[in-house]
Image: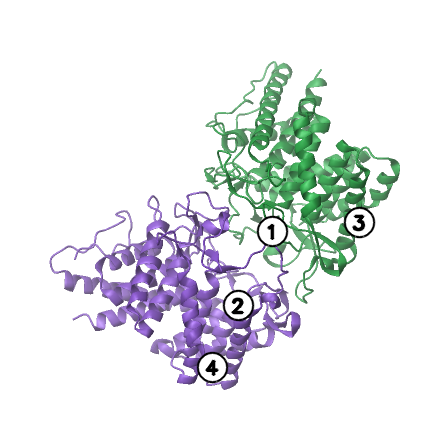
Chain colours: A purple, B green
Amino acid sequence: MSYSRHEPGLNQCVWSVVSGSQGTMSAVKLEECRERIRAELDNVVDFWLKYSHDTVHGGFFTCIGKDGKVYDELKYVWLQGRQVWMYCRLYRSMDRFHKPEILEAAKAGGAFLRKYARVSGSSGQWKCAFCLTRDGKAVKIQRTIFSECFYIMAMDELSRVTGDKDMQLEAEQMMEQLIFWVQKDSSGLGRPQLPGDVPTNGMAVPMMLLCLVQQLTEGRGQEVVQKYRELGSWCVQQILQHIQRDGTAILENVSLEGAELPGCQGRLQNPGHALEAGWFLLQFSAERGDEELQRTAIDKFVELPYQYGWDKEHGGLFYFLDVDGHCPTQLEWSMKLWWPHCEALIAFLMAYSQTKRPELLERFSQVYEYIFSHFSDAENGEWFGYLTQEGKVALDFKGGPFKGFFHVPRCLYMCERILDDLLENKD
Amino acid sequence: MSYSRHEPGLNQCVWSVVSGSQGTMSAVKLEECRERIRAELDNVVDFWLKYSHDTVHGGFFTCIGKDGKVYDELKYVWLQGRQVWMYCRLYRSMDRFHKPEILEAAKAGGAFLRKYARVSGSSGQWKCAFCLTRDGKAVKIQRTIFSECFYIMAMDELSRVTGDKDMQLEAEQMMEQLIFWVQKDSSGLGRPQLPGDVPTNGMAVPMMLLCLVQQLTEGRGQEVVQKYRELGSWCVQQILQHIQRDGTAILENVSLEGAELPGCQGRLQNPGHALEAGWFLLQFSAERGDEELQRTAIDKFVELPYQYGWDKEHGGLFYFLDVDGHCPTQLEWSMKLWWPHCEALIAFLMAYSQTKRPELLERFSQVYEYIFSHFSDAENGEWFGYLTQEGKVALDFKGGPFKGFFHVPRCLYMCERILDDLLENKD
């Protein structure tokens, strides 16, 4: 087994392993890698503990500049929910984060969410706002399900560390509402029904629902597991519908019957999203012992998106692509965003840990090098989120309307845990 | 008077006028410039006549690739209305475009719009869709006024070439609806009223209304002119509220009382928009003989946005900026878009034509050089729309969801006419 150095110009190359005593060498490299990831996670947690807490009104600031200064006081609900979730997950699963400071921050964030995020929608259904003022007044409501998804994640995870059964119940009730919108009747989301607006299967919806099924059932009793069992399988089927063109492409939007849609919408590819779906499917296949699904996840949702999504010229994953090679209409299509790289890092490491196929670790190393030489900010901590195609920082803030305390720490947390397992079982 | 060559590396430098026989030389250069603009307008009109007409379902394709191929059949209503308007304007004001082919295309586009664009909104009010399928089914409705604005522009201009009084009446009726939304009650637009969503004065609304006042009143009888006179003055006052920070900045969003708003929204600058407002105000000040407004328009809406909006390193106008120098949250903030450069070209030439101040012509030349060396596509015709900060083509299509037959031909048409006037009166 021999790792090649993919990008000779980069500083962070930890993978230039010579052949020979490979077994030992790769374990050393993995160990180095784990240490770096662990230190980076500490750094990132410190950054958000230090700069994001609103001790006056509660909740978290999410618009945080490169050096930690708050540049806008709006509170984005996706990011409030994700930060609560992440704090709780770290608190309950990693000893060094099992600290009162983190628990208190999670509880304060949860209280802010419960007090302000829910707003009454149409037909007497509850919606969650997308954005709140600093003191909790609703500014905007999206006509999608995602604010609610992150609200559920926050409530379920918080109920696990506080033992609050009401909170768990609230998460499950909101989940019922969500399932109703997705599977029965979406009119409560507030979008007018238009004759040209054909319902579609967008990748994000079954992915988020699958993530929630895994969240709500993990370690719970059989009753809860059974309750969501069928929904989990349904989500997987919906995700697999996105394999198109005889297995050569993952498309972001397909028809409800799983057929390709016309135009830009139908040809759209989002490699980072496919890779994220990949590791969701890998987790699911491991839980159910489904080897065929594992193979499909690795072939189609991990290796394939990397093949078409990686920029051969400048490195990094494109944000959007068009399967026929047209130019996408999204102005940011060629930018390199932090989160697809987070998802890729998890996906390759998880795929490697399940199969031990060396080429998967090689891909992991390539993504790892790109991340640490481009996104990670050695000067002020945390990561930049948005690079040009060439890899230059294009937007220099650490937190914004869509970047909070989530993708980076989730990636580092997942990778550290997988590396712990790999290194524990290395012999 | 001496023009300096701003960007020595560019091919298209037509302004390197040596001092000496300046008067004659500058007239020669202006003449060259007019010829180039005239040829470019012919080329652009040909491009859209050739590639955009849907002879099966009517209306115009707007998603057109770099070489003229349609890559998506969706029909964006802003662009349908704008194309009808532009064809009619060319037909009735420039001899060489007074051709049956252009009139028929405008009428066919107008018929498609009247048949399909209007959809019933809430409270029995009419809305216009934002996007239609190829055969006219509504796909999306925006909760803003802009589809309706371009519908009005199309109907009014079309009524001028066809003499159809019903169409003119329809434009005026839609205008009444629009004024009601803006000045009385916006609930018909479909946005929920949220406690944190404070009403604001965004630059786009008074600009569009002022544009419509000028459209509906141009050359009409005193009754129509009087009807909209007060509204025109109101729009100007609303636009002038965007002059902030003791006259040192134009901000895109202010409070209804004309005060600065907090956060990113309040600090946002859109130099291209300010420049477009600049020439709207210059037209208005000329109509009303208002010299003070003319001075304000040039100082604050033409010269100032250029000062802060022009990229000193790479040339071109930034799309968005933050007045305090924070990084904007719009991913595309540093890109160079075609339309701000169109607006700048018109604004500087109009300002020069009204004042004959040489530095304004110098700015015109700088924008002109940037445009012809970056946006104009000598190979396949028309202009690219979206460049990276460094000036590389980032999205290579000629038409997309927001780029149609409008900013480029309007700019070339306006500049050609102003140059005609300047050259006619050059002695």
Residue at 60% of width from left, 25% of height from top?
B42
Give the label on residue B176, or none. Answer: 3
Chain of the residue that carries numbered disc 4 in the rendered image: A
Spatial separation of the CA atoms under disc 2 and disc 1:
36 Å
Give the label on residue A389, or none. Answer: none
Which amino acid lies under the numbered mark 3 shown in the image of this protein? Answer: Glu
Give the label on residue B268, or none. Answer: 1
Spatial separation of the CA atoms under disc 1 and disc 4:
40 Å
Relative horizontal placement of residue B309, taking residue B240 as reference (left or right): left
Give the label on residue A182, or none. Answer: 2
Give the label on residue A159, or none. Answer: 4
Residue B293 visible within the image: no
Spatial separation of the CA atoms under disc 2 and disc 4:
25 Å
Relative horizontal placement of residue B86, taking residue A11 as reference (left or right): right
Chain of the residue that carries numbered disc 2 in the rendered image: A
Mark 3, secondary structure of its residue: helix
User: Marks 2 and 1: which is nearer the front?
Assistant: 2
Residue at 52% of width from left, 66% of height from top?
A146
Chain of the residue that carries numbered disc 3 in the rendered image: B
Q: Position of residue A55 (x, y in %)?
A: 54, 73
- Quarter where residue A417 is shown: bottom left
Mark 1, secondary structure of its residue: strand
User: Marks 2 and 4: which is nearer the front?
Assistant: 2
Closer to us: B261 or A266: A266
